């Protein structure tokens, strides 16, 4: 009992233990599961948006109702659940409510109030997480023991290619390049994380690793999360490698079905040395003749299915993952030694800082920014 009481009708007095003895209450740890979710903002909520309640699971937002109970008037958000069940949540108590973020939002099934559906779903997720963790440990243990392809030492062409770089490399770039080359020349499959801010020269490091792979007749797959970035990096690779007998191609939805078919045929026969593309590279119909190096740009932006395919590809080939913002899991694996890590701390000389503006939507501002970039010869550097 939290407190005692007195009843005159029965000459009864009840005294709670806490009123006689000092009882230390155990503090319940607040769950952080919902902290990372997208918080409710009424301006962004639309009718039929999916909402996740910490206790009751997935429901659908209907609207806001004003209800008077026990003389107190409050606003409540109205959530619909399976079977047309309704849940009212006070607008001043939304700590346990978040917007739903995830795939298959068009075919999402609502939970049933008062059932164990949501509890069972959370248990399944915990079980799957443990299984994923075990698979990762087995994968990296297997890679440590596996004999991979040991690339040759630098050729004269490699030195000539690197000398043709029109900018002066930073000390960090040179150090990272040497660390990657050392890994590639080892018989153990490389799995290195390259960290560096935007504009710090990660792409040049990747191009040199790709060139080294091509010198040993091993194909390179450069995987990026967006179609625009795929086109940009394809243009960069093609420009840098144009003086050498290295065939570079791009694979994304910008290619017609006919073009994609031709590219896939050439990739399988070994006519293409470097393929730059989106998750299309991970499709089942994509076959390599002799893949030696996989370069991944911003791995955390890929979906679950893409990551599963990447994981299977990683078993026997060299992998270089590049990011400006590593996710905690990737960073932790690097810190504990499961993955090697190289960091570019130093920006190139005369690098201008990234400028970010938060503005109301204005077509004129966007038009002016795009024209300004086109005038200085850049195809796409805006993030709107």
Image: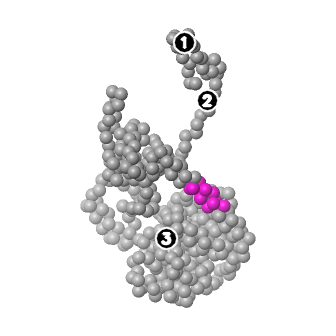
User: Which x, y percent locates residue 267?
Assistant: 53, 85
- Comparing 336 with 107, the one in front is 107
Query: Residue at position x 70%, y 69% from top?
Result: 142
State which region is magenta. 124-134
3D distance between C-alphas at marks 1 and 3: 78 Å
Extreme-right residue of the structure = 145
| Cα–Cα span, label 1 and label 2 | 31 Å
Q: Nearer the viewer, mark 1 or mark 2?
A: 1
Vertical placement of residue 307 versus 31, above or below = below
Q: Describe residue 34's horizontal placement relative to residue 212 as left or right.
A: left
Compared across the picture, whether 139 is left or right of 252 comes to: right
Q: Residues within 10 Å of mark 3 (few under 14, many from 20)?
A: many
Q: Which residue is mark 1?
A: 10
Residue at image coords 72%, 73%: 146
Q: Which residue is mark 2?
A: 25
**Numbered mark located on residue 224 in the image:** 3
Count of residue discs = 3
Image coords of residue 380 (percent x, y): 38, 69
Q: What type of secondary structure mainly makes up the magenta span?
A: helix
Instruction: Write down the quadrant of residue 329 in the picture.
Output: bottom right
Mark 1 or mark 3: which comes first in sequence?
1
């Amino acid at each position: 009992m939290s407190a005692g009481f007195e009843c005159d009708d029965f000459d009864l007095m009840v005294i709670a233990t806490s009123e006689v003895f000092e009882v230390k209450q155990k503090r319940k740890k607040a769950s952080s599961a919902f902290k990372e979710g997208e918080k409710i903002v009424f301006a962004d909520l639309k009718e039929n948006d999916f909402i996740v309640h910490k206790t009751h699971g997935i429901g659908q937002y209907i609207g806001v109702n004003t209800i008077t109970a026990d003389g107190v008037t409050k606003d409540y958000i109205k959530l619909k659940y399976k079977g047309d069940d309704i849940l009212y949540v006070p607008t001043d108590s939304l700590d346990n409510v978040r917007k739903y973020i995830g795939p298959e939002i068009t075919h999402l099934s609502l939970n049933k109030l008062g059932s164990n559906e949501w509890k069972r779903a959370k248990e399944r997720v915990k079980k799957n997480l443990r299984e994923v963790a075990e698979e990762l440990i087995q994968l990296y243990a297997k890679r440590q023991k596996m004999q991979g392809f040991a690339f040759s030492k630098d050729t004269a062409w490699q030195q000539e290619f690197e000398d043709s770089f029109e900018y002066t490399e930073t000390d960090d770039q040179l150090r990272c390049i040497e660390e990657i080359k050392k890994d590639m020349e080892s018989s153990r499959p490389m799995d290195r994380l390259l960290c560096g801010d935007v504009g710090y020269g990660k792409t040049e490091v990747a191009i040199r690793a790709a060139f080294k792979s091509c010198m040993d007749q091993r194909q390179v797959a450069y995987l990026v999360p967006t179609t625009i970035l795929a086109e940009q990096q394809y243009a960069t690779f093609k420009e840098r490698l144009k003086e050498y007998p290295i065939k570079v191609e791009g694979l994304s939805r910008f290619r017609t079905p006919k073009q994609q078919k031709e590219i896939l045929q050439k990739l399988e026969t070994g006519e293409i040395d470097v393929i730059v593309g989106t998750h299309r590279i991970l499709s089942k119909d994509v076959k390599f003749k002799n893949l030696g190096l996989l370069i991944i740009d911003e791995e955390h932006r890929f979906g679950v299915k893409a990551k599963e395919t990447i994981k299977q590809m990683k078993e026997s080939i060299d992998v270089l993952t590049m990011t400006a913002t590593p996710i905690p899991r990737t960073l932790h694996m690097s810190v504990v030694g499961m993955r090697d890590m190289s960091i570019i701390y130093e920006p190139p000389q005369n690098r201008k800082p990234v400028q970010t503006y938060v503005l109301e939507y204005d077509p004129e501002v966007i038009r002016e920014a795009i024209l300004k970039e086109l005038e200085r010869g850049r195809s796409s550097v805006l993030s709107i």
